[in-house]
């Protein structure tokens, strides 16, 4: 069973989301990996192993997924 953080203080919002935005990517550490959710749908959470999440970040940063970051 994966324990998902419930307290908003446990979730970290992406720095690309800006202030007060409602369409934000949030992440939180769990005992089983990294939890990811969109702030508009906080009940829908994906949990990935740390190595898988690191691979996703590397692909996004390199532009292989979603285009280059600004």
Image (cartoon, rainbow, N blue to C red):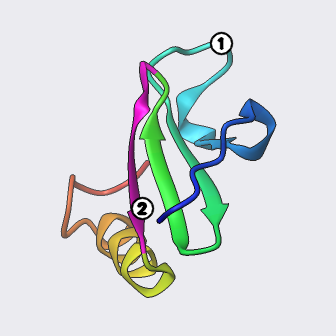
Residue sitting at the far right: 9
Find out whether the residues at labels 1 and 2 contact each other: C-beta distance under 8 Å.
no
Relative vertical location of residue 3 with respect to residue 26 in this rendering, above or below: below
Relative vertical location of residue 13 with respect to residue 29 in this rendering, above or below? above
Give the side of residue 17 with respect to residue 15, left or right. left
Q: Where residue 56 appears, x then y in whole percent? A: 34, 71
Q: SS class of the residue under badge 1? A: loop
Q: Residue at x 58, y 57 (%)?
A: 3
* Left or right: 69 as drawn, with respect to 7: left
Magenta stretch secondary structure, dominant: strand
Q: Nearer the viewer, mark 1 or mark 2?
A: 2
Residue 68, given in percent of the width and then of the height, sits at 30, 57
Front one among 21 and 8: 8
Magenta stretch: give its range: 40-48
**Camera-side residue: 32 or 59?**
32
The x and y percentages for residue 5 are: 65, 47
- Determine the image quadrant of residue 58: bottom left
Q: Earlier in the sequence, mark 1 or mark 2?
A: 1
Question: Per the image, is 39 magenta?
Answer: no
The residue to which callout 1 is attached is: 20
Left/right of residue 41 with respect to residue 5 in the rendered view:
left
Residue, disc 2: 47
Number of residues whose C-alpha sits closer than 10 Å to that of mark 1, classed few (under 14), some (14–19) or many (20 or more): few
């Amino acid at each position: 069973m994966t324990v998902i953080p419930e307290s908003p203080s446990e979730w970290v919002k992406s720095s690309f989301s800006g202030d007060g935005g409602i369409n934000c990517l949030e992440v939180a550490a769990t005992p089983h990996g990294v939890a990811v959710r969109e702030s508009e749908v906080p009940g829908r959470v994906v949990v990935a192993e740390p190595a898988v999440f690191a691979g996703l970040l590397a692909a996004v940063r390199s532009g292989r997924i979603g285009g280059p970051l600004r």
